Amino acid sequence: MLVKTKKSEIPKFWWKNQFDKNYYTVYLPQLPIERTLFEVEFLKKSISLNRNQKILDLGCGHGRHTLELAKQKFNITGLDFSKYFLNIARKEAKKQNISTKFIERDMRLLKMQHSFDSIISMFSSFGYFPHDENINVLKNIFAALKPGGKFLIDVINSHDLAKNALKDGEKLANELYETKLRYDLDSVSITETNTYSKESQIGHTHKIWSKKINQEYCIFS
């Protein structure tokens, strides 16, 4: 049975607590260097990236695509709201002697006019705000692109997630657990309740996607 989440039950800024150390610990094992290299090659070919372009990695997280492209001498900037992730990215850049720029900013405050030849948004980094705010982010992305610029967005595959996601109560990493997962593939919505460490018992419930939003995003992308 699908668990429905009322809008009033969702913390307004739930995403600020979602993308933290626990999130990083859970997902890092799923992101080996081989995956990053494959995705970077896909990016280079699919939107014809070249080293004369200015590129923005929007929602760059801990910088795996930004760092790899910068290592290959692409002119790329990473932008993310998470100080925690950006600190990891900057430390890794320093460790590898990679020259690139990271900006700490909410993507809703992008406000960069005609600044980039290409903008990428990877690992489902987009789509977590109310509908009207998501649309405004897309408009700001369009404004930030130079004429003829390209925007590539990587979004979750709901059918693959439903097939491969953890089952209720399945152990993640160390003492991290996913306790509830419910899917509605017809509306492309996902409702989840996460409980992490036994000590902290951190939990939250939220609806990530809706069919209406995905349809409109496809028009913009």
Image (cartoon, grey):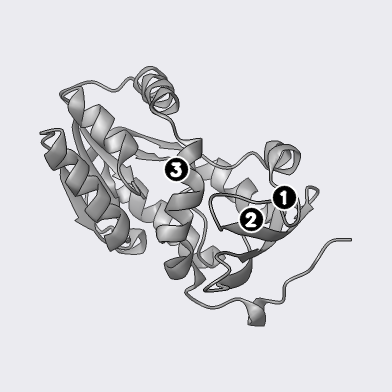
On the image, the x and y values in percent for residue 60 come to 33, 46
Residue type of the residue flagged with mark 2: Trp
* CA distance separating discs 3 and 1: 25 Å
* Location of the N terminus (image quadrant): bottom right
Query: Which residue is pictured at 32% across the width and 60% down the height?
Result: 82
On the image, the x and y values in percent for residue 150 come to 36, 33
Instruction: Residue lying at the far right in this picture: please name it.
Output: 1
* CA distance separating discs 1 and 2: 6 Å
Residue 187 lies left or right of residue 68; in this view the side is: right
Q: Earlier in the sequence, mark 1 or mark 2?
A: 1
Q: Earlier in the sequence, mark 3 or mark 1?
A: 3
Please identify, in this view, whether the residue under mark 2 or under mark 3 is nearer the observer. 3
Above/below status of 57 relative to 128? above
Tell me the residue that label 1 is attached to: 188
Q: Secondary structure at mark 2?
A: loop
Q: Quadrant of residue 16?
A: bottom left
State if disc 2 and disc 1 touch (CB < 8 Å): yes
Above/below status of 106 relative to 171? below
Q: Which mark is residue 170?
A: none
Query: Which residue is pictured at 33% across the width and 34% down the height?
Result: 65
Residue count near mark 2 (Cα–Cα under 10 Å), binned few <14, some 14–19, many ≥20: some
Residue type of the residue flagged with mark 1: Val
Front-most of residues 28 and 199: 199
Query: Which residue is pictured at 69% across the width and 47% down the height?
Result: 166
Tell me the residue that label 3 is attached to: 28
On the image, the x and y values in percent for residue 217 come to 55, 47
Please identify, in this view, whether the residue under mark 3 or under mark 1 is nearer the observer. 3
Q: Is residue 103 visible?
A: yes
